[in-house]
Image (cartoon, rainbow, N blue to C red):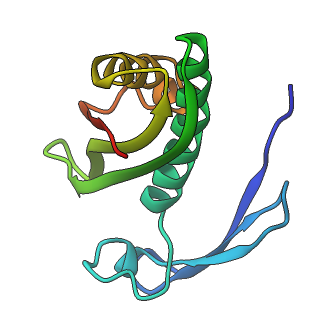
Amino acid sequence: MPTRIARTAWNGGLQDGQGQTELSSSKVGTFDVSFPRRTADDAGGVTSPEELIAAAHSSCFAMQLSAVIAEAGGTPVALEVTVEVTLAPDPAGGFHIPSIAITVRGEVEGLDAAGFQQAAEGAKATCPVSKALAGVPTITLDAALEG
């Protein structure tokens, strides 16, 4: 199985520094990162580790859910997955990710709402990124069929 690589070049201190994170394996982009933008309500065109985690989790979950739906006898027509990753001060010092919220809306043939919910729970349990994030205290799931 492949190994994927990202690289960050950082210059300066935490508060006055900045960096660029490169998606090295795919070569699809280089993105600016900054601690002050990371902790601000407005990202100001700068990404963060939390946004990159959200991107990884949403794409992984969508892929895994499509597989679980097929295993359950359904046909995924369309899935829209949004993942919100929260950064907060850690009572033990520094920062941590206390919660992740997964929202999925799907158009699926061959499964009812209960079957879709069961498939979504299964995808949450078996998605490789979900497994990697098992140390996050709270990961919620809001799954519903549409259409």
Residue visible at 50% across and 73% down?
47
**Placement of 60 over or under 20, stated as above or below:** above
Residue visible at 48% across and 86% down?
45
Give how far across and how far down residue 5 sits, in percent: 78, 49
Residue 27 placement: quadrant: bottom right
Give how far across and how far down residue 143 sits, in percent: 30, 35
* Direction from residue 113 to residue 74 in the image, left or right: right
Toward the viewer: 26 or 141?
141
Q: How many marks?
A: 0
Give how far across and how far down residue 3 sits, in percent: 82, 36
Rendered-image quadrant of the N terminus: top right
* Direction from residue 108 to residue 141 in the image, left or right: left
* Direction from residue 72 to residue 8 in the image, left or right: right
Residue 60 placement: quadrant: top right
Toward the viewer: 111 or 6?
111
Toward the viewer: 70 or 49?
70
**Placement of 98 over or under 134, stated as above or below:** below
Residue 145 placement: quadrant: top left
The single residue placed furthest to the left in the displayed view is 91
Give how far across and how far down residue 53 sits, in percent: 49, 50
**Placement of 6 over or under 39, stated as above or below:** above
Toward the viewer: 2 or 60?
60
Residue visible at 38% across and 80% down?
43
Residue visible at 29% across and 37% down?
144
The single residue placed furthest to the top in the displayed view is 72
